[in-house]
Structure formats: structure tokens, C-alpha cells
Image: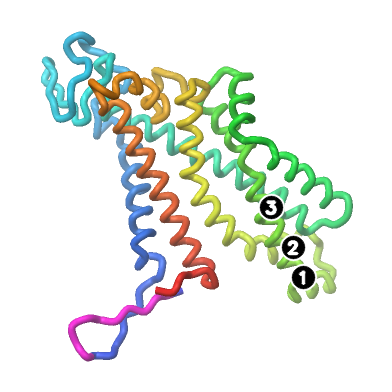
Amino acid sequence: MTATRRIRGGADPAVQRVPWFWADRRAAFGVAVFLALAVVAVFAPLVSTGDPALQRDVVATRFLPPLSTDLHGVFHLVGTDRFGRDVWTRLVYGSRISLSVGILAMVVSVAIGVSVGAMAGLWRGTARVTLMGFTDFALALPRVVLLLLLASLWQPSALLVVAVLGVTGWMPIARLVYGEVRGLSARSFVHAAEALGVRRSAILSRHVLPNALTPVIVAATLGVGNTIMLEAGLSFLGVGVQPPMPSWGNMIASGRDTLVNAPWVATAPGLLLVLVVVASTLLGDALRDTLEPSKRAVR
């Protein structure tokens, strides 16, 4: 799918055709942010001091401001925290946790939601009623309360946060897939496949699901930012990723008491969190406009 853009600076009516997605500044911004964070996370030892829990001389290095150098000659781009740990290093290693948790949890949610929604949309009778009834029941439960309950029952860890966020976020995707599958099941190509004796599972995997995944991709992209925000909230409350392992949530929690004398400790991870959520939202909007032409705004 392409967008047409006229060449400026002349009367030549020729037009240049560029891919719609990459011509969208929202998509470019979102991809740039996630790509930069991914590169930083992968090469964390090369772009930081290498140890997010490193404490040299706590008294001499605590609460150093950004762009300062300590007594050992180590440069601190974003300053240090109350234990003399480099905030930039903790941000870099925290991006590994936050991005991994957000993406993996969304993968779990998509896998469960697509499976439940597809089966409910294609099956009939008691199976459909049971699956959608369970989905509606789970959707009615307050997610934050459920998250806190599940996280408090077991020892908090990154793996537990992925599991908890994954099993509490599949319901909207299931409803979305259910509606798409129901609509596609009434199309002529599905009726033709049924008339030819094609098994229902084959119809679902070959004909229905490939055409129903467009809104799922958009929803998953939008949901990554929300999942990262939820992980940060759990870590902030102490039921997520536990110190000394850094995540943006527990970094904000550790700096909330020093907002006056050392605001960079909590502000830096907070700004990164906002940046990722905005990038996720803009990228999701661009994908929606690209994959769903009927919802594209007139430019």
C-alpha cells in the first residue's frame, strides 16, 4: 500500500510513490525508539560501566549530578543514586528487563487470546458460549487487583511478572479475534471450503486466521507500551522485579524520596517510560492506518 507525494519545486506533475508506512512520521519515530532501545539493551556492557549493582565508595559517590566524574575517574552521564550506582548503567540494564517483560507478556496474551477467540468464533453451540462466557467473566475482573493478588501469592520475579501480565491481558484480544472470525466465517470462501469438505481446523488456520490477524497486530503493538507500564507499576509497588536487579519501575520507586535533592534518579527512568509508551502508541496508530485503509485519516 502506498501514499502519493508530489515533488516540490517545479511544475512537473510527476509523483513519487513511497511506502505509506515508512512515510508516516509516527511509524518512523516508534521504530527508531524501539530500535535504539534494543541496540542499547543488547550491547549494554559496551555502552555502560558493565555492572548495574556496582558500588565503589558510597559516601563519596552517592547522588552525584549528571555529567559528573567521581573520585575514581568514572564519568556518570545521568549521575548516581543513593548507593553510588551509575544511573545510566541501571537504565540500560533496566531496559533489558522492561522491554523483555513487556514483549514476552504481550506474546503470551496474543497466543491465548487468538486461540480462545478463534475457537469461539468458528465453533458453535456450547463451546462458543462457554469460551466467551469465561472471557467476559475474566474481562469483568479488575486487572490491577488481580495482578496484585497473583503477584503477592508467589515470590516476585521477572518470570512471574511475564506470566501474570500474560494471563491477565488476553481477554480484549480474544474478543477482537472472535468478532473478526465471526465476520469472516460468513464469507463465501469459507462456505466454499466447507462445501468441499475441508476440515474446520484447516479452514481456521488457512483461510480465516490469516485474514483476522490485522487488528491483532495493531492491538499487540499498542499493548506493549501498556504492558511495560504495568510492569513498572508492579515493580514500583514492590511486587514485580526485585532489587538489586534494575527495572524502570523499581528505579522510580528508589528515587521517589529524593526528588528534591536528586531528581534525576527517578526522573530519568520516568522519562524513558513515557518515551516508550508514546512510541508504542504512535507505532500502533501508524500500523492501523497502514493495515486498515478504511480507518485511515484523510491527509
Residue 67, given in percent of the width and then of the height, sits at 14, 30
Q: In the image, is 85 to the left or to the right of 236?
A: left
In the picture of the structure, the residue carrying the numbered disc 1 is 186
Residue 37 covered by magenta stretch: no
Q: Which mark is residue 182?
A: 2
Q: Residue furthest right?
A: 125
Residue 4 covered by magenta stretch: yes
Q: Magenta residues?
A: 2-11
- The image quadrant of residue 165 is top right
Q: Nearer the viewer, residue 95 or 145?
A: 145
Question: Residue, x 28% and y 30% (percent of image)?
Answer: 45
Question: Secondary structure beneath disc 3?
Answer: helix
Mark 1 and mark 3 residues within 8 Å of each other at the beta carbon = no
Q: Is residue 245 above or below residue 296?
A: above
Q: Which mark is residue 168?
A: none
Disc 3 marks a residue whose amino acid type is Arg
Disc 2 marks a residue whose amino acid type is Arg
Mark 3 and mark 2 residues within 8 Å of each other at the beta carbon = no
